[in-house]
Image (cartoon, grey):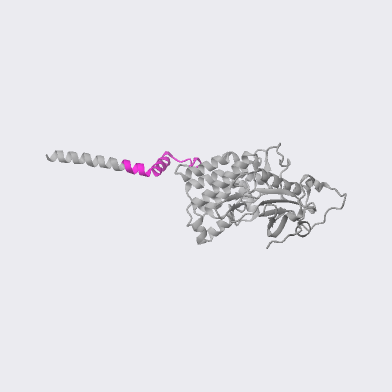
């Protein structure tokens, strides 16, 4: 049974500011204050980065939702507070079937920020790939290569839409993709996302998000080279997401993260130098990697952004080409390969033509045979 919890005192565990006290954390002053009795705490879901996620019951709508909070918001720098609110507002603007929806944003009576999202059932893509690697029978049955490519296309759909709104995700990886119990695919965790539109109300500050080592924040193995070695020639942008999509496809083909099991600095070094083994060489011996998919993956993960797909739509179209028996552009196939794929797509027609030709040849031979013996 659910129980009502004072989010102000038991979940956030901070004291409200004294009367009349104001500081720069009043960035939330324009956000609505929600009555504490609206949300009933059920359990903690998890935590990571700068936020924790709770499962709560929304008494207004009568449903369970996930609530993101900043338990230590008073100790956080202003940039973190702005990023938290920006993530909520940015995600709320991305209304798409493959992007996790945000329901509510506000502060509790203590001044602690929160936002609520769809409570996700199912499992992450990362979990699916781990189970496939362990050859879990049920997972192997459910997630064939065809099924994984369908998931990948839905991820592409989400990112293509975000790009159309001028927004980059910048932390795409299997852990940030949720696969629902009934086939739903949702891209989540837009905490590092940025808007490239300077006029957007959720535009990112004109600075890079960097860690203590001077690297742009992200996940090594999926981060594009330009996220590690920042240059004016190749700024972080849409092409960085395309690289990460290639990394997700790489993981689907090999059941391992790109450059897995290497020390952090070695991962970063190989990323910026482009020293990544082709998927076919990194995949388990019993896992076939089609040449076409390997070519698509390598094009998406090209070291130079100019050599990658120039849009998510181009990447997705090459996946469609593979699925429907055409040669992807990334493969740069010979005319002979195109001819072979044409024959493969039109087996019945080719078989019928060969049958008709053979029948005509036999009829001609029979005619001359009987004509000769008369």
Task: Quadrant for residue 12, please give it.
Answer: bottom right
Q: Is the magenta stretch mostly helix, strand or loop?
A: helix
Which of the 4 image quarters holds residue 51? bottom right
Taking the image as shown, residue 81 lies to the left or right of residue 123, namely right
Q: Which residue lies furthest to the left in this view?
A: 374
Q: Which residue lies at the image location 50% right of the left edge and 61% below the top edge?
A: 137
Percent position of residue 155, x then y: 58, 47
- Residue at 54 percent across and 46 percent down: it is 153
Magenta-colored stretch includes residue 364: no
Nearer the observer, 321 or 4:
4
In the drawing, does residue 290 fall left or right of residue 241? left
Q: Quadrant of the C terminus?
A: top left
Residue 343 visible in rendering: yes
Which quarter of the rendered picture does the N terminus lie within? Answer: bottom right
Residue range highlighted in magenta = 328-353
| Apparent side of residue 192 relative to residue 16 in the rendered image (left or right) | left
Q: Give percent across and percent down for residue 29.
A: 80, 46
| Residue 123: % across, % down | 59, 56
Q: Is residue 130 left or right of residue 215?
A: left
Q: Residue furthest bottom?
A: 1
Residue 344 covered by magenta stretch: yes
């Amino acid at each position: 049974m659910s129980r009502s919890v004072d989010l102000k005192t038991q979940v956030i565990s901070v004291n409200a500011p004294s009367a009349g006290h104001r500081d720069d954390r009043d960035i939330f002053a324009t956000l609505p204050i929600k009555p504490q009795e609206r949300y009933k705490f059920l359990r903690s879901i998890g935590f990571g980065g700068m936020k924790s996620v709770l499962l709560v019951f929304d008494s207004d709508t009568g449903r369970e939702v996930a609530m993101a909070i900043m338990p230590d918001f008073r100790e956080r720098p202003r940039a973190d507070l702005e990023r938290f609110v920006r993530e909520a507002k940015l995600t709320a603007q991305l209304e798409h079937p493959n992007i996790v929806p945000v329901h509510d944003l506000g502060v509790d009576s203590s001044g602690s920020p929160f936002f609520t999202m769809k409570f996700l059932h199912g499992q992450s893509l990362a979990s699916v790939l781990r189970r496939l690697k362990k050859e879990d029978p049920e997972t192997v049955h459910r997630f064939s290569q065809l099924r994984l490519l369908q998931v990948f296309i839905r991820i592409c759909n989400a990112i293509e839409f975000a790009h159309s709104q001028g927004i980059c995700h910048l932390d795409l990886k299997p852990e940030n993709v949720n696969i629902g119990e009934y086939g739903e695919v949702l891209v989540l965790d837009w905490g590092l996302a940025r808007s490239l539109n300077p006029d957007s109300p959720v535009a990112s500050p004109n600075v890079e998000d960097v860690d203590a080592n001077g690297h742009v924040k992200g996940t090594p193995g999926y981060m594009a080279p330009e996220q590690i070695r920042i240059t004016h020639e190749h700024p972080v942008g849409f092409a960085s997401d395309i690289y990460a999509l290639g990394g997700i496809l790489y993981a689907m083909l090999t059941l391992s993260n790109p450059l897995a099991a290497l020390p952090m600095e070695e991962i970063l070094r190989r990323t910026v130098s482009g020293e990544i083994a082709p998927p076919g060489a990194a995949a388990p011996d019993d896992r076939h990697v089609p040449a076409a998919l390997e070519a698509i993956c390598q094009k998406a993960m090209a070291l130079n952004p100019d050599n990658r797909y120039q849009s998510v739509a181009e990447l997705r179209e090459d996946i469609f080409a593979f699925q429907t028996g055409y040669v992807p552009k990334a493969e740069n196939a010979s005319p002979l390969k195109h001819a072979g794929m044409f024959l493969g797509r039109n087996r019945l027609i080719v078989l019928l033509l060969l049958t008709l030709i053979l029948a005509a040849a036999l009829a001609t031979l029979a005619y001359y045979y009987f004509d000769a013996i008369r």
